[in-house]
Amino acid sequence: MSGSSGQGMCNSGLPRFLIGSEVGKIRELDDTDMRNISGSFGEDEEEDQSERQIVVGICSMMKKSKSKPMTEIMERLCKFEYITVVIFPEEIILNEPVEKWPLCDCLISFHSKGFPLDKAVSYAKLRNPLLINDLNMQYFIQDRREVYRILQEEGIDLPRYAVLNRDPDRPEECNLVESEDHVEVNGEVFHKPFVEKPVSAEDHNVYIYYPTSAGGGSQRLFRKIGSRSSVYSPESTVRKTGSYIYEEFMPTDGTDVKVYTVGPDYAHAEARKSPALDGKVERDSEGKEIRYPVMLTAMEKLVARKVCLAFKQTVCGFDLLRANGHSFVCDVNGFSFVKNSMKYYDDCAKVLGNMVMRELAPQFHIPWSIPMEAEDIPIVPTTSGTMMELRCVIAVIRHGDRTPKQKMKMEVRNALFFDLFEKYGGYKSGKLKLKKPKQLQEVLDIARQLLAELVLHNDCEIEEKKSKLEQLKTVLEMYGHFSGINRKVQLTYLPNGQPKASSEEEDVLKEGPSLLLVLKWGGELTPAGRVQAEELGRAFRCMYPGGQGDYAGFPGCGLLRLHSTYRHDLKIYASDEGRVQMTAAAFAKGLLALEGELTPILVQMVKSANMNGLLDSDSDSLTDCQQRVKARLHEIMQKNKDFSEEDYNKLAPTGSPSLVNSMRVIVNPVRTCDQVHTLIKSLTYQICKRLEDPKSADLQLYHSETLELMLQRWSKLERDFRTKNDRYDISKIPDIYDCVKYDTQHNSSLNLEDTLELFRLSRALADIIIPQEYGITKAEKLDIASAYCLPLVKKIQLDLQRTHEDEAVNKLHPLYSRGVMSPGRHVRTRLYFTSESHVHSLLSIFRYGGLLDEQKDEQWKQAMDYLSAVTELNYMTQIVIMLYEDNNKDPSSEERFHVELHFSPGVKGCKDEDNAPMGFGFRPASSENHEKQTNPGSLEDLSQDEPDRAALTEPISIQRKSPLIRNRKAGSMEALSESNTSSRGLAYRIFPSTSRQSPEIKPSGLGAQCAGLFSASFPNLRDLTRAPRKKPSSLRSLSSQAGFEGCSLVPSIYPLETLHNSLSLKQVDEFLTALCKNGSEAQFKRLKSLSAMFESHSQPSIDVDSQETPVSIPVQLNQPAAQPLWYTSGPSSTVSSAGPSSPSVAEPSSNFGFNNE
């Protein structure tokens, strides 16, 4: 090549070759370099083999070949003494024939948009270089059908799938049947949620379709645009043009794993937030998507090896879904580098360089041997230092604020109802729950048919139920469409008909079996309920390491990073009620800082816990004990005289202050019920008057309710509360309180008279009826509690056990953990969202089950006094169990594991400030707060702010900042050290103005750092409700960007109170074991009598919703362990639980089972 021609080529800007210099920098090749390497564009020249370099050619589009990862890796590769890197210019690749492409000994070439793969294949045939990535296989990688075929042939796990080919030549592969909640593709059924992927791997428009029970719609994924990678759409029907792969949706808890191989023996794995979750891309300060390297299990490393070899791609990226204890490959991307990881760049260059030298050095007579340095540094577990390490958080939480629940019961004997009961397998258990649109439509059809027959035949037997049939029809026809979230019908088999309560009806009992039909509607989570759940989720972060303040001064540290790096083993369960599931989704949104709609979060993060009553309960099928308790309550509350001393002993044998105070308010139960009924009549009269007023024609109440609907609510209560013989149905009292509480908070702008008096009286009645329905004496409370939540108690015990038994856990790779405070830390979190019945029952178990003796334990006595003063377990009530490990104690010591029990009565009610019970705080204070104490011995109010007033009608938006308290020394590490040195043994409740001492609470563990959730009433919600009263101008800062509908403020939530913080794990385990044993025996007797009842009705059963009934594994809790329960087999940092790796066996007397999550 002449100098002039070389100069001309440079000026024209055509071929620009890069070469690595001695110091690893990349410079432009000059003419001498060109001649030394490969002559003038393919003109072979004889060279001295001993002087020649091994040329590695990079043949790809310029965007890829000059990317930062490629540049970083090639710089490092050039440090190999005998390796030279040449980048093929894009102009040459696109415009020149392959004969004129530069020569190379090793080719790194890969397809991307616009790349001529055919020419690269021709070049490889012509020059026969060593191929790092096979080129022919790259055709297959562009077709998802071929990718899945190859994966299947290699025996690699992938989601269940079917291919829909819309090809006129192959009509047999184009059979699609679409239903409301599933599709059938060529005979293969996929229930929602399912995934729809275009067959072309270049098409990134992947859709996920959600079931109607979760809100329907779809999440539409696409190649990242700015900060978004997906968007939620209300569209629920699949695409009708193009070919697609349909596959089962894998619940991955919101995190995807991307794996990058460099040869079959090296794989780097990173976790990122799933694009399907909320579509918001997490980016760092440089605008790069945040990803966290994680460790692969031995099985996943084998999968990486198989993928690398099967597709013949040395450098290869693929996607893993970790779900249900298994790993599934869902996509293979081909050539792909890790971004922003210096460690990966070093490793990749080293592995590639060694590979090239091993293959080519012998033929070039280059003296070279593989370095013997160890590539894998042994994993060194880290500990959390001298402080106790948080190992497990278990929380049982009631759902958030909801619309009033409404219910109608009717006994049915018509054959049509029995046919429906049999059709959906009702005889299997004697109970049936119908929620799906198709099922509700069938009930509606029966109601319409019977009403039509009534008009024609005027059948007397049906006539008695006409009003209820009409109500059944009216409710099912509401909204013009069905949604399983806000309506359901329950049918219960009654072998001898329904027993009539003497106070209600005097009809003669009819013989023969019947069905009790219970229609439920309303009870939807309100916008305020969503806000409460989301804000509580945010505040919960402060319980975790690095969760205080602005992540303790370390950006990206704390719970969010803990979760993304697989050191947080999180599972969220919810009962099958829509309000409970939406509460769980909103909480997850706040906890993990997610954005967007709740439906995608619900589908991916929340597990439906419909497993043998884990979180669900049939409140209409009462135990014998509950029947007796209700009868006694009814008897006492029907006396038209003042409460006597005997009544106090009968109704409040535990001497609970909240009960005694309510009885003093009521004085005479019948007279109080008279007052309540009169007030309800007054209320309905006022609403009727409003309806007649033209100004109220378009009046919109909270959550889109109308005055007509509000009137229906109250009119029904007015009719149902007073029975035919002028006695009162006290079972309606909770509903009355429910409605007046809702209207007082959300609809107070109507200014209806006497609502506060109705609220006061109905609350006093409800404060007796609601808690006492779960048992009057301690023995009854325990018996009923066991019936409700024995499965949940067993599950909690398993959670505590598995925290330190399982070692098969997804871990963060220690080599990549710079900036992560403690890569070995694992925290197991189990969140159970449920309804009031389970919260009451679980609290009864801890209160009356014999965990501790109040006479001997002062801290427990104070806790019991506090619980006795709590009048209501309101929305968002929390029972929290925290397990810590003291790494300084002997592994076999009982002191190694430490348990704390905490409680919050949930949302503040109206007028709560006057009589709110006072707890004893959560954590130790700093000496700074100790000096400010005003009255160490006094009990103060839980909050300084006034009760919420719904009269402030302007909608308020919720600030998006984290609710954690800023700049408060008590929430920092410095405050912790102060409290541990100067105030050891003392604990305080931190408030903005005052604090108090409680010598019995012992500071321990990371809980001592927590601010916000435990130290004071919910900081952001409290500030929100108080801000308009203190500074009206502050509403401007709470902009309307996230405002919620309606006209009421969001009530703040009471902070957690420590019930006990010096329990040992052994102590708790023995307590739970004894409870489970006693409860199982009682349950076994109940189940035995139930099965005898249905012997004559052993019909073939059909699962109403097979998707909601997971296969259960029997559990044995009483099997003697080979080692003490509190023994741990290794350092705490390596021990955790991630799923179903520990076996579980069956207890003979138990009928309950769980999966191992």
Image (spheres, helix red, strand yellow):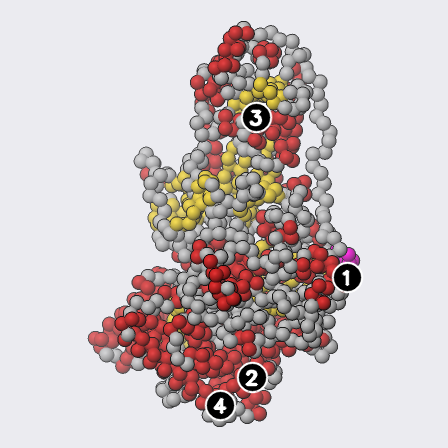
Q: CA distance from mark 1 to mark 4?
A: 56 Å
State whether residue 447 appears in this view.
Answer: no
Residue 330: % across, % down: 50, 41
Q: CA distance from mark 4 to mark 2?
A: 13 Å
Mark 1 — residue? 981
868 relative position to 387: left or right: left
Q: Amino acid at mark 1?
A: Thr
Q: CA distance from mark 3 to mark 1?
A: 61 Å
Q: Amino acid at mark 4?
A: Asn
Which comes before the other along the chain, label 3 or label 1? 3
Q: CA distance from mark 2 to mark 3?
A: 81 Å
848 relative position to 476: left or right: right
Q: Is 892 a magenta residue?
A: yes
The residue under the point 48% across, 32% down is: 141
Point out which mark residue 132 bears.
3
The residue under the point 54% across, 63% down is: 1023
Magenta extent: 886-893
Q: Residues within 10 Å of mark 3 (few under 14, many from 20)?
A: many
Point out which mark residue 668 bears.
4
Point out which mark residue 661 bears.
2
